[in-house]
Amino acid sequence: MAPTPSPRTGTDRRSFLRFTAGAAALLPLASLAGCSGGGRDAGTLRIAFQQFGSNTIKQEWIERAAETFSAQNPELVIDLVPIVASENDYFTKNELLMSSPRTSPDLVYEDSFILLSDVGAGYLQPMTDLVEGWDHWDDIAEASKLAVTGEDGEVYGVPITTDTRAIWFHREVFEQAGLPADWQPTSWEDILEAARAIKDSGSEAIPFFMFAGTPQGEKASMQGFEMLLYGTGDGTGLYDEDTKKWVLGSQGFIDSLAFLKTVVDEELTASLGQLLDPNISEQIYTSLLPDAKLGMLIDGSWISQNWTETAGRPWPEWPEVVGLADMPTQDGGGTGTVTLAGGWGLSIPQHVTDRETAFRFLETLVSTETLVDYAIADNHISVRNDVAEVEEYLSYSPAVEYFTKLLDTAYYRPALPAYPEVSSALQEAMEAVLTGSEPEAAAAAYDATVRDIVGPENVQEAQG
């Protein structure tokens, strides 16, 4: 792999790289938005991205690319805008920045689930003409291309990462509960039985955790509810691609909420306060799971990034201590297992200063060499064939091959502008169950909300 070019000799690194929001991102948005002064400098290229907790992996990836880009473009300054926020807050703050020509970044890091909503709101501009002349466009998986393509057929982003989800389990907790080290559940009931065994073993560990409720944002929808719903076997999911309508009233929806109610009612999961803590994920990764205080967790392919040598909580033993199991379908039917796939990419806002320059920096950010390094540091699955063929990528993690294979049968969220609002309704339904509502009542409230969101002409009752 070619080394990253060094900054030009005699140049102070801060002359081409600065932090518009390093500390200001912790302040209210009014402070963040005002930190650049009155006007936009044509010689400055600004990139906004999420920085969660102590994780600076994205920042380091952008810094390395900025050094390379600056060596070739000494007249330009790269402004980093790390938005230190939880997932939901990041989307809100990013949209507020993009809404004004004075504060808008030139590149933004976008989750595929929010992208088309941002397109519909007028925050992003098409990139079709730019990507069609780019060498690596054909290396991107077709499903990932579809996720960044609007209903108008235009491309609005360059996909970078993808991911899959499974059950992470602590083998020592399982051993204490008399459960096998190679555990693989074949139904939801197997998960419940394992959780009950952990609870009955006298272990201090929380038996089972899945993200749920509005404070958890999209994690609740994707790592939680949809990992259940898409395994219920009713063949409908959230949206019917054939009829182009959102599906309401499915038994699978109610059953998914009933599973959540069972783990809460039987005290097989964390306390309500923990479930509704927007920062619980960092506690899970840095203490609960490494310290054997959690038995099972439904989560994504990337979470072992929290245990590398340079992470906040190094845990070199995790490959021996942690097991991975496919998420089963409700009763073992269908394909037998289920996973959801998503991903992030880079987009150009409507108020970009110079779209061609922004795309040139984007090309540096997503060169093969840079993305191999980023995938390894971030512990994600690449959407690019050229990256996936590099031996260093293929061998960077004990889990990368496992999670990559799950892509073959992965479900994707409906890539539609209404999805973020529908997702919020899912989170509200989960939270209602967490706080005492019956699954049927929470499902009925969800149905009513979705009718209001998309219009009664765009919904249908589940079949069967």
Image (spheres, rainbow, N blue to C red):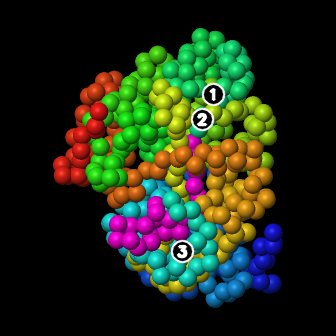
Magenta-colored stretch includes residue 316:
no
Compare residues 242 and 136 and report the one nearer the observer. 242
Identify which residue, 287 or 4, lies in the foreground.
4
In the picture, the disc for residue 326 is: 2
Element type where label 2 sits in the image: loop
Q: Tell me how far mark 1 sits from mark 2, CA to CA.
A: 7 Å
Classify mark 1: residues with Cα within 10 Å, few (<14), some (14-19) or many (20+): some
Is residue 246 shown above or below 249?
below
Please identify the quadrant where the N terminus is shown. Answer: bottom right
Q: CA distance from mark 2 to mark 3?
A: 40 Å
Q: Residue at x 76, y 37 (%)?
A: 319
How far apart are the alpha carbons under marks 3 and 1? Answer: 46 Å
**From the viewer's perspective, is the residue at label 2 or at label 3 nearer?**
2
Q: Is residue 70 left or right of residue 247?
A: right
- Which residue is the site of mark 1? 184
Q: Would you say 279 lies left or right of 243 here?
A: right
Q: Specify the amino acid type for callout 3.
A: Arg
326 vs 342: above or below: above
Q: Which residues are magenta?
A: 145-165
- Marks 3 and 1, the one that precedes in the sequence: 3
Residue tagged 3: 46
Q: Is residue 109 above or below residue 435?
A: below
**Label 1 sits on what residue type?**
Gln
Q: Mark 2 or mark 1, which is nearer the start of the sequence? A: 1
Alpha-carbon neighbours of circle 2 within 10 Å: few (<14), some, or many (≥20)? many
Where residue 380 appears, as percent x and y from the top left, is 64, 53
- Residue 282 in sight in this render: yes
